Image: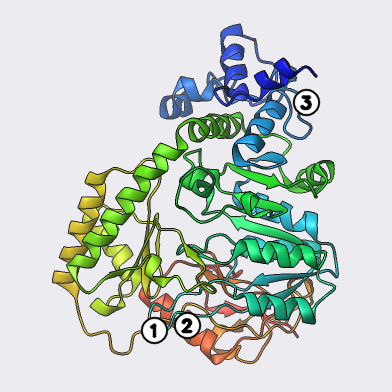
């Protein structure tokens, strides 16, 4: 390949999938393929809702538009551009959300019987991947901030201890950052993994902006991690359900593709893929300026919320060099318990009374997600609403729970527990001491309170009961009312 051709391929001003779709639109091809709506003609109500511009490019894979399962032209070019923009050796377009990206990452690194070192406060997609592949988790239990009730990062000494006790582990997985913006010492953990012949994987569902902004925590690829899952649709601006899987030079590109193709659709959405393509271009060209603005808005919001009194919008002051090695200051995480309200109560009140939808609320905190589309006037509306909620609803916090993390008692692997022969479901309050065979979690953030293979304790049952009473959105078990749980015989 000539240098000139390579230069053209890696021009970050290009968006090859978008360009191919625009060219295809102009060709006026007669469709005798899927999807059946035939560019919207067959479903006028859908076309009226989404618009002709949208349904007209909701098309199937074909030679001019490449194929996501085996890309050789425009999708391949888009992946190369993404890899360069993110500083990775390889990049893969993912249309099953970062859940699919995380699962592909874990399935690439692990097979049945392997051990993987990871924090327990991972997204359910990580443990789902262990259910699928049969790997065994070695949990590094994070510290919990006693005032905020949130999980912190992985302490280096705890990672070293896990490595020493499990030298046969094949990988270490790190959250970069957590939902609340907490970052572990990723570079040191990467080095520890590589010194012990382990891969280092990063769940960067909430860290897209690390690759493009300044004065932000280090990104996984810059830290030398082997694979990373990046939720482009969160802080990167692409359509919901679109994501990137990034890889370094030490993981075989072809094998990763094979793993992805085990679970990802063969009918990749060109709406999602083109949104990744266009959004990558936007961040590559303007990301530094964009996230400088996001950082400014976040710091302004933090100072204004803290000036209200009662709330605590926490930030870089939490950094301690280990369990909080760094902090993502674009995360507007706010502790609410000091006004006598659980985070989920503030979350519900903001939506129901003020028409403000924030990302989530748990037992003690809320998260307002700031990204490329936010403006200062919306932040001022949020600050005003929080001030009024404090004035109207503040009460004594006595008796309120704040603990967000419960150390698990692991009895069986997630796969063995999930597929094991189960006893008939038991009333949830009668399951203490039994081993759970399904998930229970608040979503968001999607971190399991109890996962398959873990013993159900009184503390877990108290937490679940309290979270339900406060109105948390509980998911996971077969029983949608979370009144019954499946347990092992």
Whether pointer 3 and pointer 1 mark residues with C-beta atoms closer than 8 Å, the reply is no
The answer to whether residue 43 shows anywhere in this view is no
Task: Give the side of residue 362 with respect to residue 222, left or right.
Answer: left
The correct choice, above or below, for 429 with respect to 257 in the image is below
Mark 3 against mark 2, which lies toward the viewer? 3
Sequence-wise first label, 3 or 2? 3
**Mark 1 sits on what residue?**
401
Mark 1 against mark 2, which lies toward the viewer? 1
x, y percentage for residue 386? 22, 63
| Mark pair 3, 2: CA separation | 50 Å
Which quarter of the rendering shows the N terminus? top right
- Residue drawn where x is 67% and y is 34% of the image: 268
Which quarter of the rendering shows the C terminus? bottom right
For disc 1, the neighbor class at 10 Å (few under 14, some 14 to 19, many from 20) is: some
Q: Secondary structure at mark 3?
A: loop
Mark 3 against mark 1, which lies toward the viewer? 3
Q: Secondary structure at mark 1?
A: loop
- Residue drawn where x is 38% and y is 44% of the image: 292
The correct choice, above or below, for 4 with respect to 468 in the image is above
Task: Give the side of residue 474 with respect to residue 370, left or right.
Answer: right
> Residue 72 shows which numbered tag?
3
The answer to whether residue 412 shows anywhere in this view is yes
Q: Nearer the viewer, residue 466 or 259?
A: 259
x, y percentage for residue 178? 52, 64
Whether pointer 1 and pointer 2 mark residues with C-beta atoms closer than 8 Å, the reply is yes
Q: Nearer the viewer, residue 254 or 250?
A: 250
x, y percentage for residue 348? 31, 63
Sequence-wise first label, 1 or 2? 1
**Mark 2 sits on what residue?**
463
Dividing the picture into quadrants, the one containing residue 187 is: bottom right
């Amino acid at each position: 390949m000539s240098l000139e051709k390579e230069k053209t391929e890696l021009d970050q001003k290009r968006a090859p999938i978008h360009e191919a779709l625009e060219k295809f639109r102009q060709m006026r091809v007669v469709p005798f393929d899927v999807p059946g709506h035939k560019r919207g003609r067959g479903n006028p109500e859908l076309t009226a809702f989404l618009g002709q511009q949208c349904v007209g490019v909701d098309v199937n894979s074909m030679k001019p538009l490449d194929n996501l399962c085996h890309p050789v032209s425009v999708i391949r070019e888009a992946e190369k551009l993404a890899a360069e923009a993110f500083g990775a050796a390889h990049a893969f377009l993912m249309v099953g959300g970062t859940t699919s990206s995380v699962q592909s990452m874990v399935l690439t690194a692990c097979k049945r019987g392997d051990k993987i070192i990871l924090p327990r406060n991972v997204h359910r997609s990580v443990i789902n991947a262990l259910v699928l592949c049969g790997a065994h988790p070695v949990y590094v239990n994070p510290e919990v901030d006693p005032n905020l009730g949130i999980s912190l990062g992985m302490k280096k000494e705890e990672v070293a201890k896990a490595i020493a006790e499990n030298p046969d582990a094949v990988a270490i997985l790190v959250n970069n950052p957590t939902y609340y913006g907490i970052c572990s010492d990723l570079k040191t953990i990467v080095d520890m993994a590589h010194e012990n012949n382990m891969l280092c994987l990063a769940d960067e569902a909430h860290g897209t902006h690390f690759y493009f902004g300044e004065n932000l925590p280090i990104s996984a690829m810059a830290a030398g991690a082997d694979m990373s899952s990046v939720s482009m649709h969160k802080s990167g601006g692409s359509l919901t359900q679109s994501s990137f899987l990034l890889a370094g030079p030490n993981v075989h590109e072809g094998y990763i593709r094979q793993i992805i193709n085990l679970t990802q659709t063969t009918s990749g959405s060109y709406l999602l893929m083109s949104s990744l393509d266009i959004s990558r271009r936007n961040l590559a060209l303007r990301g530094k300026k964009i996230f400088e603005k996001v950082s400014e808005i976040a710091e302004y919001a933090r100072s204004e919320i803290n000036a209200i009194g009662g709330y605590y919008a926490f930030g870089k002051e939490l950094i301690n060099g280990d369990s909080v090695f760094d902090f993502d200051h674009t995360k507007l995480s706010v502790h609410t318990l000091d006004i006598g309200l659980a985070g989920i109560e503030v979350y519900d009140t903001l939506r129901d009374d003020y028409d403000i939808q924030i990302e989530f609320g748990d037992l003690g905190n809320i998260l307002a997600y700031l990204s490329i589309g936010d403006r200062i006037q919306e932040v001022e509306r949020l600050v005003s609403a929080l001030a009024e909620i404090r004035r109207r609803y503040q009460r004594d916090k006595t008796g309120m729970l704040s603990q967000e993390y419960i150390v698990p008692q692991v009895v069986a692997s997630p796969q063995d527990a999930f597929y094991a022969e189960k006893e008939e479901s038991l009333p949830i309050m009668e399951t203490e001491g039994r081993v759970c065979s399904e998930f229970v979690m608040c979503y968001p953030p999607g971190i399991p309170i109890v996962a398959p293979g873990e013993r159900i304790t009184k503390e877990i049952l108290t937490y679940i009961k309290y979270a339900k009473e406060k109105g948390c959105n509980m998911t996971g078990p077969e029983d949608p009312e979370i009144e019954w749980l499946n347990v092992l015989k």
